[in-house]
Image: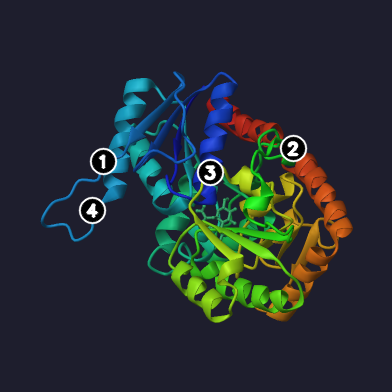
Amino acid sequence: MKIGIICYPTYGGSGVVATELGLALAERGHTVHFFSSARPFRLRSFRPDVYFHEVPVVHYALFEHTPYTLTLSSTLYETVQMYGIDVIHAHYAIPHAAAAYMAREMGGGKPPIVTTLHGTDITLVGSHPAYAPVVKFTIDQSERVTAVSRYLAEATRELIGVTRDIRVIPNFVDTEVYQRGLCTLDRKVFAPEGEPIIAHVSNMRPVKRLGDLMTAFIKLRRRIKAKMLLVGDGPERARAEMQAQRGGVLDDVLFLGNQVEIHEILSVADVYCLPSETESFGLSALEAMACEVPVVATRVGGLPEVVSDGECGYLVECGHTEELAQRLWELCANPELRMRMGKAARARALELFPRDKVVSQYESVYRELIKG
Ligand code: GMT
């Protein structure tokens, strides 16, 4: 099959899932065309069956904001005509589903569209009255719609009033890459005295609640020596750095910025923490689980579908920093417990979210459409 994948190029779960899916499809013999404003960061090496189409951003004095949706629609349409793409897969509804719709209509109703909802395209941005009508319309107009968790499928019905069928296809992890045994990093670089290491990976937006993470870490440090690795960058980083400094823990918190080899960092971690306000899935938690790292996360959104409470980590109430600190302490202070939970976490990742099983589900969605 020839599959067109639209995604965001930057650090973020939807771009990661889209890129890893495309690469896995290419490995299975399909031809994949990626569409994005820049090369997706996980699309590193060359493959003859993987194309990347950079969507132009055309400025003009009259435009206060460049109409990216239009250039994406044109790029999609042209590429479909030229390469005979069989199906367009839009990752993240805004504005990708709208551009796919426009390209399909320009092409006389072809090719069919699969839209995958990732989370904030519904929960934070998509349900805003300024976007909701077009998000609902383009979801309704897609031939198939998938969501990364049961929670997100339900939220799409509740928040936007979508009534059509939404298939749940969870995110996945490549357990061959994300595994502890392959790590080449020396954990002493981060924790010279053998301190337990807590890791967090995010785009550091308010929804990730870095303030809660830092408050909990400051509380934890009063009880035990520990280090924290923060991977990623974003608007809340500076505030978190200040909080760490004021709390007297800056020496124990390492802000590593955006990183590509996340599995290396996760593999030296002892606990993963994701205290988000909302999280449709929590891909980074799954990646940590695959590396045998138990997770302490909030009981929100799709996280309970990923992290089983008391088995591969703990779920806590959002905003309860005392409970968060307590659970972090339990794992930091007890190597036997975190090892047992880490093993259970990897077993769950292998059982429920392995790459091949999930990629096959997407493949069968495409096949249904192409046959149809
Ligand atoms: O908000 C983010 O963290 C980025 C966003 C994205 O566009 O990648 O993440 C969403 O999609 C991921 C991949 O499906 C999910 O794992 C994240 O849980 C989801 N984020 C939220 O729901 C906040």
Residue depicted at 56% across the width and 71% down the height: 250
Give the Cα distance between marks 4 and 1. 10 Å
Q: Name the residue under label 4.
A: 66
CB atoms at circles 1 and 2 under 8 Å apart? no
Left or right position of 88 against 198: left
Q: Which dot marks residue 181?
A: 2
Disc 1 or disc 2, which is closer to the eye? 2
> Which numbered disc flags the more N-terminal residue, 1 or 2?
1
Disc 1, SS: loop
Pinpoint residue 307: horizontal percent, then vertical percent. Answer: 75, 57
CB atoms at circles 1 and 3 under 8 Å apart? no
> Which numbered disc flags the more N-terminal residue, 4 or 1?
1
Q: How many marks?
A: 4
Left or right position of 332 against 115: right
Give the Cα distance between marks 4 and 2. 46 Å
CB atoms at circles 4 and 2 under 8 Å apart? no
Res 121 visible: yes
For mark 3, does the 10 Å Cα neighbourhood hold few (<14), some (14 to 19), or many (20 or more) residues?
Answer: many
For mark 1, does the 10 Å Cα neighbourhood hold few (<14), some (14 to 19), or many (20 or more) residues?
Answer: some
> Which numbered disc flags the more N-terminal residue, 3 or 2?
3
Q: Name the residue under label 3.
A: 16
Disc 1 or disc 3, which is closer to the eye? 3
Give the Cα distance between marks 3 and 2. 22 Å
Q: Which amino acid does label 3 sit on?
A: Val
Disc 4 or disc 2, which is closer to the eye? 2
Q: What residue type is labelled 2?
A: Gly
Q: Which dot marks residue 130?
A: none
Give 133 or 340, whichever is nearer the viewer: 340
Give the Cα distance between marks 1 and 2. 42 Å
